[in-house]
Every structure is written in C-alpha cells, then in structure tokens.
Image (tube, helix red, strand yellow):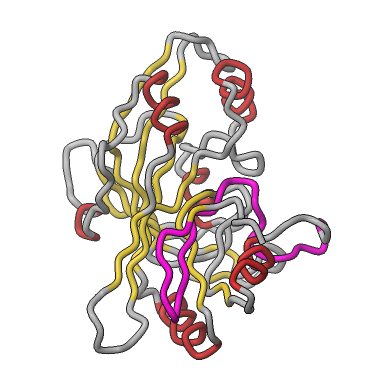
Amino acid sequence: MRAPRFTVLHQDEQIIVIDKPAGLLVHPHPHAPDEPTCVGMLGKWLGSPVHPVHRLDRATSGALLFATNSRTAHTLALQFQEGVVGKRYLAIVRGYVWGATTLIRPIRRKLKGDERAPAETGIRSLDRTEVPYPVGRYQTARYSLVELNLVTGRPHQARKHMHHLAHPVVGDKRYGDKDHNTFFREHYGCEEMLLRSMYLSFRVEENEPLREIVAPIPEHWRDLAGRLGLEMPADYRPSPAEAFTEQSEQDLGVIESADSTKL
C-alpha cells in the first residue's frame, strides 16, 4: 500500500507519532463515515491496528501519538488523564497578546453535556503584528503568535480558552471571528485553522528517560507569518512550564474563572 498522506515523526515497536495535517479526522465520525481517518490509514499502512491515546480536532494539525498495542495505549492514556504529558501548541490569534498568562477555567468534559472539569492553559506571546487592512469595524488588524501549554486536555480547550480571552484562533469556524477568518481566506488564501500541536513529552516505561517529540513548523506557516510580519522561530523549542507564569508589566498573570456557562 502507498504511504499515507502524513509524515511519521517517530516510530518504534510501542508507539508511532505522526504529523497530522489539518482537515484529517483522527478516527471515524458518525457524520462522516466514509472519510479517511488517521486510525484507518495507519492501520492499513502498518498492517495492524493502532490505538489513539489522545485526540486532535479535525482542523488542528501537528504531533499526534498512537500506541501499537493495548498495554502501551493504557499506560499513555493514564498519563494524559493525569496531566503528566507535556503538550505545547503554536497558534496565530486575533489581537495583541502580551507576556505570559495562565487561564484556569472549567470546560465541559464532553462537547454535549453539562458536566464540567478543571482546565488550565498557559499562554505565552512570541510576537505581534499589525497589518494595514480594515477588518470589521477597525481600519487595521492586529495578530499575535502565541505558544500554548495545555496542562489539561479538555475538548476544544485551547480554542475555547483563547475565545474566552478575546483572542480567538484565526480560522476557527466554531469559536473564532468570522470577519478575520474571511480576511485570511480572501487576502492570504488561508482557510486553515492556525492551531498546531508542536510538542509532546512522555514516558512509555516508568523508569525510562523522557521521550520528546517536536513537530516541524510547516513552510506555509512560515510563508504566512512572513506576509503578516510575524517572526516565526527558526527552530522551534518548547518553553519550560515556568515560562508561562513569568510576570512582566503587561502580563495578565494567573486568571481563574469559574463561569463556564459557554464552555
């Protein structure tokens, strides 16, 4: 069988990590039963089933981890549930984001239902830009490149938390700003949601060294950043957890919010 339409970032006897493209489902969905999925393509390519141990939204790209056996899948799933897996994302969002912020705000455990669970996201500004084009009611448009540390892993967590901070992810059709999404589509030819899983750290065996997987920054992201005037890291390296709580004059610090009515 020909190779699937994604890059393998790491593969061994226990795990496989791929660079999932935006728009590809992780596993079958009842509303899209005939569409290709990462699980299906990987299973056919390897000749044996794979076990997803976490999820990325369909519109999110980047590092995605699978186990090749049920024992490893169980071990890794527990680590994700306990919040000990390191996760970093990059995103381009609306507006100026300054310094470092930690948002602690409950989110629904499932997309449908009322039960909520604690959720914590660290946000760190990497660069900001203003482009001389009117969008919505403003004569110019401002954007930021941010790094996100997902301490927990709730459904749509990064997208919901950035929406709550009034800095929605560009291209997010559900929680984003329609005017800015339209601007990116018409002016830059960009229909992708600009949220990318960049880094995972975990242990498959209890006493082994920490495994770290870093996804590359796609060339079309670099091209878009250059057109916007955003400086994209030449060689991405994840920031340590403490970098998301550093204080400066423009930092928001730690924001705790119990009102999760819309999340």
Residue 13 quadrant? bottom left
- Name the quarter where the C terminus is drawn: bottom right
Farthest-out residue, front: 1
Residue 17 spot, x, y in % from top left: 46, 65
Residue plotted at (36% across, 57% down): 199
Q: Is residue 126 above or below residue 109?
A: above
Q: Nearer the viewer, residue 219 or 106?
A: 219
Residue 139 is inside the magenta segment: no
Residue plotted at (30% across, 71% down): 211
Q: Is residue 197 above or below residue 212?
A: above
Q: Is residue 146 above or below residue 50?
A: above
- Looking at the image, residue 46 sits to the left or right of residue 247; the answer is right
- Name the quarter where the N terminus is drawn: bottom right
Residue 22 is inside the magenta segment: yes
Residue 10 spot, x, y in % from top left: 40, 65
Residue 47 spot, x, y in % from top left: 63, 75
Residue plotted at (43% across, 67% down): 152
The region drawn magenta spans 8-32
Residue 88 spot, x, y in % from top left: 36, 55
Residue plotted at (20% across, 53% down): 243
Name the magenta segment's main secondary structure.
loop
Q: Nearer the viewer, residue 108 or 228?
A: 228
Across the whole image, how many numbered discs are drawn on residues?
0
